[in-house]
């Protein structure tokens, strides 16, 4: 389903080349409903900051450069967009198209910024599909997204190899979040194909919206073990209700398999449950990719929402670019609510500088983790 012509390499150019990689925005229907009331399920409220961000990378020294914006998965929160007020696991191409249209309508400043970015000569957009936006595997939603940015967006189903840099959202390395790419859609005995959601995505689509309507921060707290203890002491009855809803979902899906076409046995069920974590550690996965692929020198993941850098050995690096969503940290050394608008910045050598006796490490792209601090503003909304 990905564009086979998109190999991640481009012909030599005299212009400077850059890539900027962002992940895990989780755009919903917008910060406000049509009647002006607050949408508490909306995770992304930084449209203005994002517009400033992409404006920066299409102006100044970047106006004459080749700049590729890589949207590395979970940009759209398609799992938690309701259909006529109902959250459902029966996700079809038609429902995803409607969801994308509603997201575009709810974030006009965001998509206007993308249109202006894509209209700048030498600038392009690439989209790697994640678990929250797995509906982008269909061609219909891809057309709607490309139309919304008024440009041909290059889509990749799982990963994007950009000349030695492996860019991937990361859900395929978690059993409970992994999309079966051999059978991404369920068609048997159905009037139209339905997205074949993994167990974790079913939970996010059906149970998490109910929990977030009462406690919007529930999926933004880390470490989750500390949050569980806090709920036990300070929010017991809501916690008990959340546990009951979760256990009911587990019984229906994994143990009795009475709903949602889950086909694991009991042994696989407990193996799956042991793997579940809101903030997985992908260090070993990244090191495995680096070890098994001699041509890959850098791995960039999203998905975990945790900013991270690790070096496997000299010349082999792993980056996780975090999220633009708010998080609440219960670690004492970094306690409190925080937002870090983080991204990966990839700078390619200027043509001609890699000639002569320059070492290979200096002739390859340089990857850095950055944080967007934005443009000075005298005020901002705490609650609008």
Image (tube, rainbow, N blue to C red):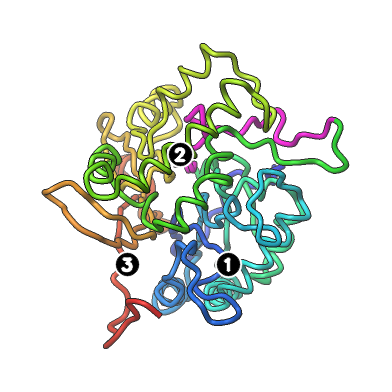
Asked whether the beta carbons under mark 2 and mark 1 sit within 8 Å of each other, the answer is no
Q: Which mark is residue 96?
A: none
- Percent across and percent down for residue 184 are 70, 35
Work out whether residue 152 can be spotted: no
Disc 1 crowd, CA 10 A, few/some/many (<14, 14-19, 20+): many
Which span of residues is magenta-colored?
A: 165-188
Q: Nearer the viewer, residue 373 or 37?
A: 37
Mark before the other along the chain sequence, 2 or 1: 1
Mark before the other along the chain sequence, 2 or 3: 2
Of marks 2 and 3, the one in the foreground: 3
Q: Is residue 262 above or below residue 162?
A: above
Instruction: Reply yes or no: does residue 177 show up in magenta.
Output: yes
Instruction: Reply yes or no: does residue 85 show up in magenta.
Output: no
SS for callout 1: loop
Q: CA distance from mark 2 to mark 1?
A: 36 Å
Q: Which residue is mark 1?
A: 29
Q: Nearer the viewer, residue 126 or 61?
A: 126
Q: Main secondary structure of the magenta part?
A: loop
Disc 2 crowd, CA 10 A, few/some/many (<14, 14-19, 20+): some
204 on left or right of 88? left
- Percent across and percent down for residue 353 are 35, 55
The residue drawn where x is 44% and y is 22% is 292
Mark before the other along the chain sequence, 1 or 3: 1
304 on left or right of 134? left
Q: Which residue is mark 3?
A: 372
Q: Nearer the viewer, residue 203 or 298?
A: 203
Report the residue that reaches farthest toward the front: 237
Q: Which residue is mark 2?
A: 164
Q: Quadrant of the N terminus?
A: top right
Asked which quadrant contains residue 244, the reply is top left
SS for callout 3: loop
């Amino acid at each position: 389903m990905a564009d086979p012509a998109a190999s991640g390499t481009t012909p030599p150019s005299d212009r400077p080349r850059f890539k900027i990689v962002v992940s895990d925005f989780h755009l919903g229907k917008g910060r406000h409903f049509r009647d002006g009331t607050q949408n508490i399920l909306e995770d992304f409220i930084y449209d203005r900051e994002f517009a400033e961000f992409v404006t920066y990378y299409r102006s100044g020294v970047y106006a004459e450069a080749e700049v590729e914006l890589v949207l590395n998965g979970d940009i759209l929160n398609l799992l938690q967009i309701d259909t006529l007020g109902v959250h459902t696991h029966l996700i079809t191409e038609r429902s995803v198209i409607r969801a994308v249209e509603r997201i575009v309508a709810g974030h006009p400043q965001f998509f206007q910024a993308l249109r202006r970015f894509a209209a700048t000569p030498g600038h392009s957009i690439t989209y790697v599909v994640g678990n929250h936006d797995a509906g982008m595997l269909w061609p219909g939603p891809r057309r709607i997204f490309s139309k919304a940015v008024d440009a041909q967006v290059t889509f990749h189903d799982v990963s994007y190899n950009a000349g030695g840099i492996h860019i991937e959202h990361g859900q395929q390395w978690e059993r409970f979040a992994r999309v079966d790419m051999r059978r991404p859609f369920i068609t048997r005995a159905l009037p139209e194909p339905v997205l074949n959601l993994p167990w974790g995505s079913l939970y996010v689509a059906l149970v998490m919206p109910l929990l977030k309507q009462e406690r919007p921060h529930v999926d933004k707290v880390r470490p989750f073990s500390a949050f569980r203890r806090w709920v036990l002491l300070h929010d017991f009855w809501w916690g008990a209700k959340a546990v009951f809803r979760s256990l009911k979902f587990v019984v229906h899906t994994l143990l009795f398999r009475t709903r949602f076409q889950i086909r694991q046995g009991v042994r696989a069920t407990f193996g799956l449950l042991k793997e579940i974590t809101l903030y997985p550690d992908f260090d070993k996965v990244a090191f495995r990719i680096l070890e098994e692929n001699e041509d890959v020198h850098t791995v960039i993941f999203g998905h975990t929402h945790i900013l991270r850098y690790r070096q496997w050995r000299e010349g082999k690096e792993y980056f996780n670019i975090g999220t633009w969503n708010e998080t609440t940290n219960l670690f004492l050394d970094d306690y409190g609510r925080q937002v870090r608008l983080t991204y990966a910045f990839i700078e390619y050598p200027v043509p001609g500088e890699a000639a002569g006796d320059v070492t290979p490490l200096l002739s390859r792209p340089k990857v850095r983790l950055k944080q967007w601090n934005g443009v000075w503003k005298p005020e901002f909304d705490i609650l609008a």
